[in-house]
Amino acid sequence: MVVAFVAAYIAGMFPTATLAGRMIGHDPTSEGSGNPGATNIYRLGGRLAGVAVALGDMAKGALPIAVALLLWDRPEAMAAWIGSVAGHVWPAVRRFRGGKGMATAGGGGLVLDPVIGLICVVVFFGMVRLTRVAALGSLSVGVVYPLLSLLLGWPGPEVIVAAVVMGLMAMRHHGNIVRLWRGTERRLKK
């Protein structure tokens, strides 16, 4: 489990948004929201750049978990899920200042349970389409994924891991939650 966690943490540190930002002439860590994630890149460079970062960040969660499932079993995959999200959110190579973890958590969640993962994709895009607020989509998934894992009979420790992973992601959205409460959260362009 330690090997799975560490390997996934290293994968989670891959600077998808920073590399995409360089390609479009922007630094997502110092422009826009300052968050190295897909939403900020979307705002800085457009839809194609945002989708590329989202897919790259999803791969950072999906690949380590797929490898852990191939080599070991679900406990190691759960450790990899936590590791990949932790690597994205708190990357040691960037002074522990990373993204919010939604796409990375989502990529791992799709591999662990494709049914729950696909439902969460629908929830995310439905909420974003309805409200034009990416943070509301992310926070909705943070509630729905662990709840569905519980309702669909995942073992207790796995439900706890799902809640921890989604909790990490929600914790990183603290600023968004404050802005939502104040009514100042930025909306995505139509």
Image: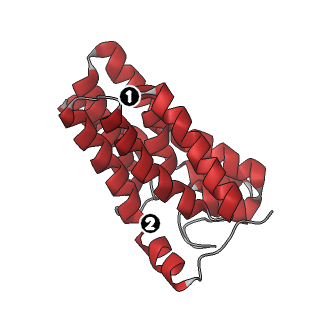
Q: Earlier in the sequence, mark 1 or mark 2?
A: 1
The answer to whether one can see residue 92 in this image is no
Q: Is residue 160 above or below residue 23?
A: above
Instruction: Identify the residue at image location x=42%, y=52%.
Output: 142
Q: Is residue 175 above or below residue 94?
A: below
Q: Residues within 10 Å of mark 1 (few under 14, many from 20)?
A: many
Residue 12, percent across and down? 41, 43
Q: Nearer the viewer, mark 1 or mark 2?
A: 2
Q: Is residue 84 left or right of residue 54?
A: left
Instruction: Identify the residue at image location x=40%, y=64%.
Output: 172
Report the quarter where the C terminus lies: bottom right
Tell me the quarter of the picture where residue 159 sits: top left
- As drawn, the residue found furthest toward the right would be 190
Residue 162, percent across and down? 32, 42
Say which of 171 and 137 sits in front. 137
The answer to whether one can see residue 40 in this image is yes
Q: Secondary structure at mark 2?
A: loop
Q: Is residue 157 left or right of residue 62?
A: left
Q: Which residue is mark 1?
A: 65
Instruction: Identify the residue at image location x=40%, y=28%.
Output: 112
Q: Residues within 10 Å of mark 2 (few under 14, many from 20)?
A: many
Q: Secondary structure at mark 1?
A: helix
Report the quarter where the N terminus lies: top left
The tag on residue 173 is 2
In the image, what residue type sits under mark 1?
Ile
Tell me the quarter of the picture where residue 171 sits: bottom left
In the image, what residue type sits under mark 2?
His
Residue 86, percent across and down? 33, 50
Q: Is residue 60 above or below residue 75?
A: below
Say which of 30 and 104 sits in front. 104
